[in-house]
Image (spheres, rainbow, N blue to C red):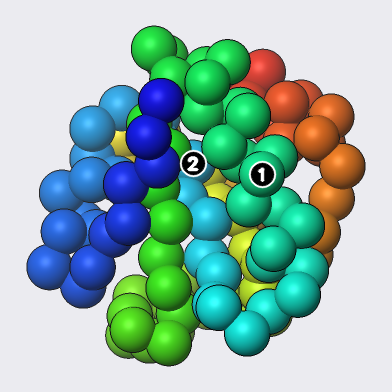
Amino acid sequence: MAISQLTEGTFDKAILSGAVLVDFWADWCRPCRLVAPIIEELSGEYGDEVGFAGVDVDACGSVAARYGVMSIPTVIIFKNGAETKRIVGAQPKNIYKEALASL
C-alpha cells in the first residue's frame, strides 16, 4: 500500500477519511529514515483498514505547527479527524502496531 504525501491543501480532507496514520518527517532527519520503512511495512499490513500518510515538516510547517509537532519523527493517528494517539521519536514496530490495534 502506498503512503500518501500530504500538503497543506490536502491534509484536512485526508484525516477525515476514517483512521489515518500520519508520519511527520523531514529529509535531513536520521531517525525519520529509521521510521520510514516501518511505516511502509505497516501500510502493507493495515492498508485495507487504515490510511497512511506523510507530512514533510519543511514543506508543510503550518500543519506541523497546528498540531504542535515539536520533534520529528512524530506519528499521529487520527480517527475521523480527531487525534487518538501520538508517538514521538523513532520507536520499534510493535509500538506502532499497538497504537493501531487500539483503533
The percent coordinates of residue 87 (x first, y second) are: 71, 54
Q: Is there any visible trace of residue 78 in the rendered image?
A: no
The image quarter in which residue 47 lies: top left
Q: Secondary structure at mark 1?
A: helix
The percent coordinates of residue 48 (x first, y second) are: 39, 12
Name the residue: 47% across, 50% down. Answer: 22
When the figure is inspected, residue 24 is found, relative to residue 84, above or below; the finding is below
When the figure is inspected, residue 20 is found, relative to residue 63, above or below; the finding is above
Q: Secondary structure at mark 2?
A: strand
Labelled disc at residue 37: 1
Give the residue type at disc 1: Pro
Give the residue type at disc 2: Leu
Q: Quadrant of the C terminus?
A: top right
Figure label count = 2
When the figure is inspected, residue 13 is found, relative to residue 66, above or below; the finding is above
Do the residues under discs 1 and 2 have CB atoms within 8 angstroms?
no
Labelled disc at residue 92: none
Q: Earlier in the sequence, mark 1 or mark 2?
A: 2
When the figure is inspected, residue 86 is found, relative to residue 57, above or below; the finding is above
The percent coordinates of residue 70 (x first, y second) are: 63, 83
The image quarter in which residue 9 lies: bottom left
Labelled disc at residue 21: 2
Q: Quadrant of the N terminus?
A: top left
Task: Report the Cα–Cα distance between label 1 and label 2.
Answer: 14 Å
